[in-house]
Amino acid sequence: MSGPQCCENPPALNPNSGEGTVEEFGGLKSYLTGSLEAKATVLLVSDIFGFEAPNLRKLADKIAVTGYFVVVPEFMHGDPYDPEDAARPLMVWLQDHAVDKGFEEAVPIVEAIKSKGFSTIGAAGFCWGGKVAVELAKAGYIQAAVLCHPTFVTVDDIKEVKAPIAVLGAEIDHISPPELVKQFEGAMLVDGYVKIFPGVEHGWTTRYDVADAEAVKNAEEAHKHMLDWFVKYVK
């Protein structure tokens, strides 16, 4: 369920991007933004390019401004996918970065969030991170989930989700095509919805060109759906 489209438009990673700080949190280096006095927490689970993607950190800061403490863990352990590394294609890289391991490492992050006094947690997952977020929702660790162009997520996964879930899909997506993503809505046993965004490709919510006004507009529309979902359920 992964392929070349998953690797297109890699971000120019910048460890110094964003307005937050990078600290160890729940056993992983993490980008933290927002106040510990916030009303609730949002966990962002990156795609295969990791937590140094400037657009991802910009989104984390945007969520924090609305009143959340936001955690973006470094699930890639300093080894984000490099499409230029011909000796290590995606399927080989994934052997070292399985989504099951991502879920296992997310659980201590959730416990660390709770140790800070937060009882309500939302999670958004992008591509690879979508599977991690859905596993958290299946296991009852979070109170709401948003999946953005998810990878590896199945209809059976959605049937087991225990938290309200919004799925934001792309019209042009060979990894999670609209015909699959639309099936998610009928499988939901909790409050949720699926929205297919027209004219956009897999990765559009975080891997957009900031100089492309239309791309920015499409990404920001998805961000609004995400924020609205968290405002409704993560409080």
Image (cartoon, grey):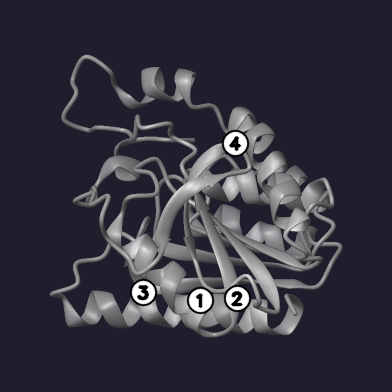
In front: mark 4 or mark 3? 4
First in sequence: mark 1 or mark 3? 1
Q: Residue at x 39, y 40 (%)?
A: 48
Q: Earlier in the sequence, mark 4 or mark 3?
A: 4
SS category of the residue bearing label 3: helix
Which residue matches tag 3?
A: 219
Q: Is residue 80 above or below residue 55?
A: above
User: What distance separates the C-alpha of mark 2 from that of mark 1?
Assistant: 6 Å
Q: Earlier in the sequence, mark 2 or mark 1?
A: 1
Residue 49 coordinates in the image, percent (x, y): 34, 43
Is 134 placed left or right of 176 in the picture? right
For mark 2, what is the residue?
68
Mark 1 to mark 3 CA distance (whole Å): 14 Å
Ranked by sequence position, the earlier of labels 4 and 1 is 4
Q: How would you rate the neighbour count of disc 1 (Cα within 10 Å): few for under 14, some for 14-19, many for 20 or more? A: many
Badge 3 amino acid: Ala
Seen in the picture, residue 91 relative to 14 is either above or below; the reply is: above
Front residue of 211/170: it is: 211
The number of callouts visible is: 4
Residue 146: horizontal and vertical position, in percent?
61, 64
Q: Earlier in the sequence, mark 2 or mark 4?
A: 4
